[in-house]
Image (cartoon, rainbow, N blue to C red):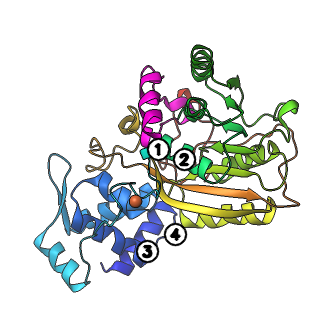
Amino acid sequence: MDIKGIAEEVYRRTGIETTERDVEKVLSGLAGSSHFWEVVCAARKPFSVVAEIIEILKQTKLVKVDEQGDISFTPEGMEFLNSSRIAPRKDYTCPACEGRGIGLEKLKELLQKFDEVTADRPKAIIDYDQGFVTTRTVAGRIALMAGRGDLEGKKLLVLGDDDLVSVAAGLSGMPAEVVVMEIDDRLVEYINNKAAKFGLPVKAIKYDFREKLPEEYVGYFHTFTTDPPETLEALEVCMGRGLTGLSGEGCAGYFGLTRTEASLKKWNLFQQLLVGKFKVAITDIIDDFNHYVNWDYLLESIRDDYTFVQVKPRLNWYRSSMYRIETLSGFKGMENRSVPCELYVDKEALIYRPGKSVDKEKKVRYIKN
Ligand SMILES: [Fe+2]
């Protein structure tokens, strides 16, 4: 099978459009690393696309998988690489800032304080698709918002906060007020306790973003930040709520979007919504800005029919790009009413399993094809 054939077969199996360049990127990643999660991280393609490409390479005996789940090329595979002119991937990311383009020297104290204050943070749970970011990522978000003039003296809305950005923002002493709207009772209580204990201008309330925004917060904030679930519907509703919370033009929204659970096709549709429907400008997209700490439930929540996938990650492989959007005159939020919406599962989701319904106890309502 040639590269074109592999791309076509991956599309047939996953239903996600796959190009010859995608296959080349995975081959190049595999030539540079034998660790599945490192290849997924580097490929910047949906999880199931990367996994299917490797599965096909395995079935056609171009790669082999050892008992530890490490993947390596067979002699035929090496020949295939050479004849296709594919070289091992090289990483040129700036090691000092991990590619964010932000120096954290001025926030050293905040980093330390944040780690101390949040040492007893609640564990990430599958019910709400949680997985929180590293401390350096949190500090990077604070620095990014502050550097763009969206934090100091401003009112900040945090929509969903397992990352505890609100606590970091409060500890930084910069924002005038921070309101967290969060569905998980554990986090609402945790954040309010920390705010009381350390005298932070932070308040958390229980909120499900499928519900209308509390009236007193419509048009109230200068800035919102969120880490939305990545079905197109959830992205749309989440942005709608955030923008509805903003007080006018020149305000900003920040959020992460992955490549692992969102194909470029989805990126395109979503960007059209941002620009066309919500009428905002996209001012920044910083690749690989958000690094997530590995969460306990990963391996039990994903497919177990690939031999190379049920391997404990050796790096913080799950990443997302940081978007910043800015409101223009005539920008639109959404009508402030409740809407039903599929939050977590589509074909590109990490926990999607073809042909299997999702465990009801995991509170995922249905699979959308
Ligand atoms: Fe750098």
Q: Circle 4 sits in a helix, a strand or a loop, which is it? A: loop
Name the residue beneath numbered marker 4: 17
> Between disc 2 and disc 4, whose residue precedes?
4
Left or right side of 253 for 124? left
Callout 2 touching callout 1 (CB < 8 Å)? yes
Q: Is residue 240 above or below residue 31?
A: above
Circle 4: residue type: Glu
- Is residue 131 part of the magenta span, yes or no? yes
Name the residue beneath numbered marker 1: 106
How far apart marks 1 and 4 lie (CA) works out to 44 Å
Left or right side of 116 for 234? right
> Between disc 2 and disc 3, whose residue precedes?
3
Callout 1 touching callout 3 (CB < 8 Å)? no
Q: Is residue 229 visible?
A: yes
Residue closer to the observer: 234 or 76: 234
Judge the density around disc 3: few (<14), some (14-19), many (≥20) Cα neighbours within 10 Å.
Answer: some
- Please tell me in which quadrant of the rendered image residue 170 appears: top right
How far apart marks 2 and 3 lie (CA) works out to 43 Å
> Between disc 1 and disc 3, whose residue precedes?
3
Question: Closer to the observer: label 2 or label 4?
Answer: 2
Residue closer to the observer: 47 or 314: 314
Magenta-highlighted residues: 107-136
Query: Looking at the rendering, in which quadrant would you find the N terminus?
Result: bottom left
Whole-percent x and y of residue 141?
Answer: 54, 46
Name the residue beneath numbered marker 3: 8
